[in-house]
Image: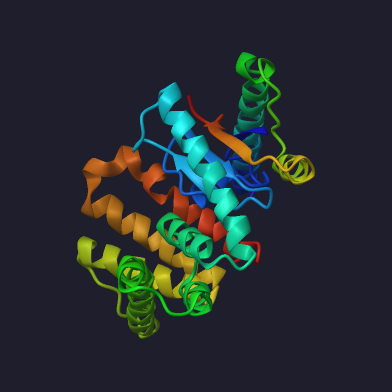
């Protein structure tokens, strides 16, 4: 089943972020997907752009699809392999991952040892996010008190932290204000990056659009 | 006030023109020769529907049209 996705940057284009959703960081990028869009394999710059390379990726995807099916039909070994793949793709949130680990029951020490670091990735990411939001809240409180840093670098970090808080709170107006402040501060702090500014802020502009549209 | 209205109108035209350009680039990409050489689908919803019906996984090739 051949599917070509084209990222267009057209306002309102459906699935325009499918590339990043599937773990792609640039073009060209190839992924093998299940019928519900679940990622089964991906082929980016970490793999050779050769027929053999693509063949290997496709075969991995087909094999993983079979394991997914078996895992969903109570084959615990297959379910374990499927879980490892999902964790390596970054497809699961921590609570989803923990439920799946529980469902696997007791694991051999080797299997547990392979799983633990992948779960730790998610735990660390969650703690980092919580701390980022907490920091953003503190800086937001400073802003409310009229305390905006004068140093360009400090102000850039100040607004960046408030962006995290605003996104967590789904506050589009605050996010927009922080985005403007962040860009202005970065342009002054790092004028040598002027030509890259649009690119650097592209993701954040997309987040702002989502917040304005009421999305997560 | 007239100057502001004119500036706003020009800004809106600029944005509309940028979007038109993006749409033209998308249309040009979708008319690419490589898409005619094999049965490529470009609609994600339809690709998933077809994958479900045929029980075949999707081989997704990602490209872009907004920049070369």
Question: Residue B50 falls in which quadrant of the image?
Answer: top right
Question: Residue A213 falls in which quadrant of the image?
Answer: bottom right
x then y, percent, for residue A216: 59, 67
Q: Give the residue displayed 46% in from the left and 66% down from the top.
A: A177
x then y, percent, for residue A196: 33, 40
On screen, residue A22 above or below A209: above
Question: Residue A89 falls in which quadrant of the image?
Answer: bottom left
Q: Give the residue displayed 72% in from the left and 45% down from the top.
A: B48
x then y, percent, for residue A128: 33, 74
Q: Give the residue displayed 35% in from the left and 66% down from the top.
A: A118
On screen, residue A102 above or below A84: below
Please name whichever residue, A188 or A69, is drawn nearer the observer in this view of the structure: A69
x then y, percent, for residue A54: 46, 30
Query: Can you see residue B18?
Result: yes
State which quarter of the image contains the N terminus of chain A: top right
On screen, residue B37 above or below B64: above
Please name whichever residue, A216 or B61, is drawn nearer the observer in this view of the structure: B61
Q: Give the residue displayed 69% in from the left and 33% down from the top.
A: B42
B64 sits left or right of A88 in the view: right
A129 sits left or right of B13 in the view: left
Query: Can you see residue A19?
Result: no
């Amino acid at each position: 089943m051949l599917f070509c996705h084209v990222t267009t940057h057209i306002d309102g284009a459906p699935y325009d972020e499918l590339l990043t959703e599937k773990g792609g960081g640039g073009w060209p990028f190839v992924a093998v997907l299940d019928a519900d869009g679940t990622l089964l394999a991906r082929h980016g710059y970490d793999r050779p752009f050769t027929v053999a390379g693509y063949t290997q990726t496709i075969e991995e995807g087909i094999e993983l699809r079979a394991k997914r099916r078996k895992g969903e039909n109570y084959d615990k070994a297959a379910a374990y392999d499927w879980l490892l793949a999902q964790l390596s793709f970054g497809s699961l949130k921590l609570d989803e991952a923990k439920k799946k680990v529980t469902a696997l029951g007791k694991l051999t020490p080797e299997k547990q040892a392979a799983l633990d670091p992948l779960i730790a990735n998610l735990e660390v990411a969650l703690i980092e996010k919580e701390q980022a939001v907490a920091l953003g809240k503190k800086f937001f409180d400073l802003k409310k008190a009229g305390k905006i840093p004068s140093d360009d670098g400090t102000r850039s970090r100040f607004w960046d932290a408030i962006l995290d808080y605003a996104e967590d709170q789904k506050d589009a107006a605050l996010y927009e204000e922080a985005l403007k402040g962040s860009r202005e501060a970065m342009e002054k702090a790092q004028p040598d990056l002027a030509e890259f500014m649009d690119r650097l802020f592209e993701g954040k502009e997309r987040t702002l659009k989502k917040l304005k549209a009421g999305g997560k | 006030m007239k100057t502001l209205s004119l500036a706003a109108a020009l800004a809106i035209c600029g944005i509309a023109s940028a979007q038109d350009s993006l749409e033209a680039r998308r249309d040009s990409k979708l008319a690419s020769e490589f898409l005619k050489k094999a049965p490529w689908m470009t609609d994600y919803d339809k690709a998933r529907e077809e994958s479900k019906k045929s029980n075949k996984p999707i081989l997704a090739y990602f490209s872009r049209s907004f920049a070369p």
